[in-house]
Amino acid sequence: MASAETEHRAPFSLDSYYVSEKLGFVLPDPLETLPPFYQPWMYIALRVPEFVNSHELRSHINQMPLLSTQFLQSHRELRLAHLVLSMITMGYVWQEGENNTVKMLPRNLAVPYWEVSQRLGLPPILTHADAVLANWRKKDPEGPFNMENLELLVRLPGGDSVKGFFLVTLLVELAAVPAIRSIPTVINGVRSGDTVAVAKALGNISQSIQDMNDALKLMHVYVDPSVFYGIMRIYLSGWKDNPCMPQGLVYEGVQTEPIECSGGSAAQSSLLHCFDELLGVQHEENCCEFLTRMRNYMPPAHRKLIHDISLQPSLRGFVQQQANEDLNKAFDVCVSALLALRSYHINVVSRFITVPAARARQLRNNSQESEGEMVSRAPTSLEERGTGGSGIMTFLKTVRDKTKDVLLPDTANDNCH
Ligand code: HEM
């Protein structure tokens, strides 16, 4: 029986979690430039690919003045500052590839970067919240959200594939907005025992997850796997569990001990974390450890939303209790959509990492032929690992299989035949 507390509590809503009605976790109208005082940062951030290419980025950064962060006030200013300083940092660390990394980030970059990170509750490294959620503008403000009308604010080396990679991921986030909006309806329906409302909201979530899958397919259109693997990937890499930077990175003027941070990954997107908590997916210990760590790379309000969804009465338990055919079906269709998305994502990872990694290995064993091939420029230390530091395929397959486990018993048995 529901306690007095659960009967009288306010309906669950997204109001206090910095989730936009129209854009979900995506930052609405990101600022495109910082106040003029921060011009030295903007100047370098807008030229990261160019300066990396000419091997001048580190010297430009070393000459940057140490700027106070006190003139950054609004949330959008702080988000742009974090994006800009993150892009500069990734370029600084990886300018010379995996063999000539740095042990220390200079004070004039490290100190303001640390302060901005502290104020936002984000780590001092490039995250999904920077590169995807806060890194877009519309060319025509009245036009649609599509590849033709979208542009990045700040780029990493990799040309059009960088643009494709971040903007396709943005489109996946946007396709998920109806799903995120339906979460409160599911939770409130479970609380009040409204089977019809829960089934309908689960239907909306399933549709939205299928739309995410369709958006993810665009990766094959807009991103070249050799460029992704051979050029871009290193700039998303972090300094935790990374053999090129076994000690992490010292942020000069912040603390003398090195800091370890995982690289950027869409595992830092709040979307699938929300779905997993809603549907009751429980990951295996190793996977869970990584995914839980990724939550520390999200804006704190989004992290809190995931946590609060996890505290709600069990949706799966409710579905089983009701024994209603429509509701059972809606639940299983939703789990199957998430399963299909994870399976498709594994395909994408195979095309963008496993296949080019095999090619790179082949070229290395056959050294004369490797000249000029993009994949052979990729860091060997990243071959079997994700930028977030995970052992890729085993991890992704285990996560997918745990999703299967929440199918209702009859469907799960059917799937075994
Ligand atoms: C070329 C495109 C992509 C590649 C190569 C890729 C690669 C990876 C890799 C290697 C991992 C393992 C974790 C890590 O170490 O980072 C991962 C995890 C993950 N990726 Fe992607 N990814 C791509 C696009 C996307 C997109 C667009 C999304 C959607 C937002 C996404 C969502 C996830 C999620 C949620 C995880 C955590 C595992 C899970 O919950 O199933 N990825 N990805």
Image (spheres, helix red, strand yellow):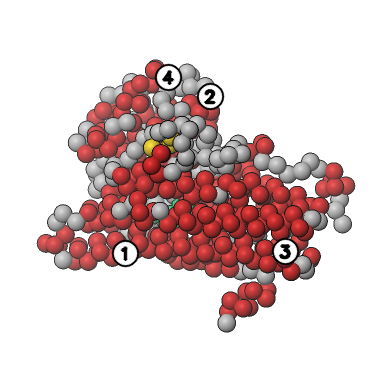
Which percent across, then down, holds residue 297? Answer: 50, 43
Residue at 60% in and 58% down: 206
For the residues marked 3 and 2, what is the alpha-carbon distance in whole angstroms? 44 Å
Q: Quadrant of residue 350?
A: bottom left
Residue linked to disc 3: 327
Please state which amino acid type lies under the numbered disc 1: Val
Please state which amino acid type lies under the numbered disc 2: Ser
Q: Is residue 410 above or below residue 149?
A: below
Q: Which element is circle 1 on?
A: helix
Residue mark closest to the camera, 1 vs 3: 3
Which percent across, then down, holds residue 348? Answer: 40, 60
Quadrant of the rendering where the N terminus is positioned: bottom right
Classify the position of ligand 1 by quadrant: top left, top right, bottom left or bottom right.
Answer: bottom left
Q: Quadrant of residue 84?
A: top left
Which percent across, then down, holds residue 344? Answer: 46, 63
Q: Which element is circle 3 on?
A: helix
Q: Which element is circle 4 on?
A: loop
Residue 74: mark in rendering: 2
